[in-house]
Image (tube, grey):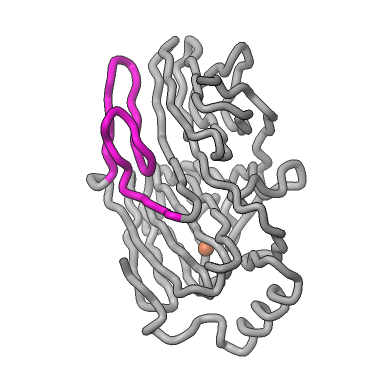
Amino acid sequence: MKRRSLKKITQAVTISEGAGVTVHRTIGTPALRNLDPFLLLDYFSSNNPGDYIAGFPDHPHRGFITLTYMLNGHMLHQDSMGNKGDLRSGSAQWMKAASGVIHSEMPQQSSGLMRGFQLWINLPGREKMSAPEYQDFSPNAIPIIKTKGVRVKLLSGQYHGHLGPINDPNSQVHYLDVTLEKNKLFSYTLNEHLQGFVYVFEGQAKIDDITLRQHTFAHLGDGDTVALKANDSGARFILVAGQPINEPIVQHGPFVMNTRKEIERAFADYRDGTLVRNKADFTCV
Ligand code: FE
């Protein structure tokens, strides 16, 4: 057993996305372009409707997976293949855009808290032009495991004999939402070959002797166990890990491919209206 230490710490950058939604971005910034297999991590949290009301009107994706986790609020997802997904507090949505999807994510509330994460997971070259897939998970499909002072919401991975519902064979993604009461310890076993990170969104926690404050992104070093301890304030964070792909990444906005030529093709297909293929290509799991 080897404890994972900290490789690098990055603070989130506040930017405006979609039609003017304020997000805290860590992966996908100049300081951290990507973290194979992850391409982007956004955390959004606001009580101010002006920060989220414009939502994310129709936009395309090709070449990767989007994984959205709603902590608070209500969004409606609609896509080019006719899927409709109600994203309510505590639910998750997994969308393999693969060869191409056009979708919108629009708030269904005009006041109150809107809070959650969006993570982009890359696809290996052999999967980039495969048929898109879509699946959403209601709050009661996601196990919550409570032990003394530790609450784990398990979107993906294995914890205390429970299995998270999201199962991606390519990335082997692990995704845990962990709440620790003050001074509580949490540990989790992660295979050595997985790339892992922690994002603290409430309170403060320590890895080794290093304090991670709110909006701190911690890239985990080599090893097979992660251990965090909450400070006096308690802490809430996500712990995410996945299998690196080790292929070239060429990204242009919502298209992520292996080569420049494939990106040009994505733009041409979008222009020509062929980014999205016929409905029969689409698998609703
Ligand atoms: Fe999107």
In this image, 212 relative to 85: left or right?
Answer: right
Tell me the residue at 37%/48% (across/down). Answer: 73
Q: Position of residue 126 (x, y in %)?
A: 56, 68
| Residue 143 located within the stretch drawn in magenta | yes
Location of residue 282 with respect to 164 vertically, above or below: below
Location of the C terminus by quadrant is bottom left
Q: Which residue is drawn at 63% across and 29% down?
A: 221
Image quadrant in which you'd find residue 140: top left
The residue shown at (40%, 47%) is: 70
Q: Which residue lies furthest to the bottom in this view?
A: 272
Identity of the residue furthest to the front in this view: 1
Q: Where is residue 210 in the image (x, y as percent from the top left)?
A: 63, 16
Look at the picture and state if 56 lies above or below 48.
below
Q: Examine the structure image and report whether residue 232 is included in the region drawn in magenta.
A: no
Residues drawn in magenta: 142-169
In the image, taking residue 236 as reference, residue 137 lies left or right, namely left
In this view, 95 is above or below 270 = above
